[in-house]
Image (cartoon, rainbow, N blue to C red):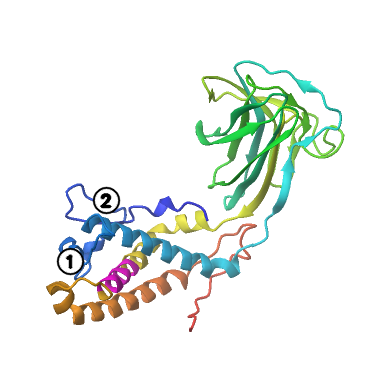
Amino acid sequence: MLDTSCLDNLIGISNTCNGTPSGSGLYLNDLPFISIANAGSVIDSEYNSAIGFLEQKLNFAQKKTITELRTYLLPYMRHASVIENDVIGIYKEERKATASEPAKYKGVNIKIDRYPYLSFNIGELMFFGDTTVNTKVYIINHTTGKQIKEVDIALVANEISYADINLEIPVKKQRLNIGIYVDSSVTGFYSADLKRGTGCNQCDRTGRYTNQYMTVQGAEVTGTDNIPLPGVTMTGNETHGLSIGYSLGCSSTEFICSISNLMAMPILYKAGEVIMVEMQVSNRFNSVIKLGSVDIEFLLQLYSGEYQKMYKDVTQNLRVPQDICFSCNNRVKYQTNIP
């Protein structure tokens, strides 16, 4: 599941010393009976503070609501990957090592365009080098100039070394332009073609491999002190010892982020429901829990009902995008699942 940080701070908590901001203008303690004081009557040693309790329950309500929405969208989404379990970098049978080179980071450049709901999923990284050394593989977003991830890999001389990473990188309505590099100052490498075939028979005259969704080519950047720098030099059909196991699949995350403003009310009421359940089962015995038990039961039913209403209002008029990841551009139908 991809990161849904686009929904963070959608609902705030007011009247705190530091304040929890609200991107929607809605605050959790605007709901009846939900306050920092009442939260303090519920918490036990599991929670650090009343505010921590409210934040944790709000976070859980957000995840629960988004999980339900993802499930709801499943019939309208493409489930099979558009590219499944493929490999960039096929090692050549003739083993000839290229020497190490200082201040160079070498690997591949990958570009994905036009498909905003795709994600590039890296399952495994391999490297075929001539030196035994512990080093890193650097994954860089060349659009932002920022590093996505560093991956530790233990290289063994003259053997193919492996690192499992299971990294998912969303396209996010922009051209995805990433580089995957190894520090060439610490090891030489054995050559690999981008794709299977002598000299990559699927590549163009510049050595790029291109399919319907993506363009891949060898690349290198300069850098020092374990920091690859932004400028990229393309090097054609050569992965510089790297081999990448990947899939290209669909994700609902970007679509959900695009309707985040519509999800504020359902998340707010789901949080109210979650908090009332916690109050109902609390083992604390005080005036809030004892005298408020009737109110807690009433509000549990109220918040649960409001959540269902707000969630239905969002889903019954949704239109799925016109994209390879969705089945059609028709209005999504609402149905109630009866247990």
Q: Is residue 204 left or right of residue 256?
A: right
Q: Going 27% across and 72% down the picture, which residue do you hit?
A: 276
Stretch of the chain drawn in magenta: 270-279
Residue 52, horizontal then vertical, whole percent: 26, 55
Magenta stretch: dominant secondary structure? helix
Name the residue beneath numbered marker 2: 21
Q: Going 55% across and 43% down the picture, which residue do you hit?
A: 174
Instruction: Name the one closer to the observer, 311 or 150.
Output: 150
Q: Going 17% across and 66% down the picture, which residue do you hit?
A: 41
Q: In the image, what residue type sits under mark 2?
A: Pro
What's the CA distance linking mark 2 and mark 1? 24 Å
Report the disc number at residue 132: none
Residue 221, horizontal then vertical, whole percent: 61, 23
**Is residue 121 shown above or below 145?**
below
Helix, strand, or loop for circle 2? Answer: loop
Instruction: Name the one closer to the observer, 239 or 49.
Output: 49
Residue 235 quadrant = top right
Q: Is residue 73 left or right of residue 208?
A: left
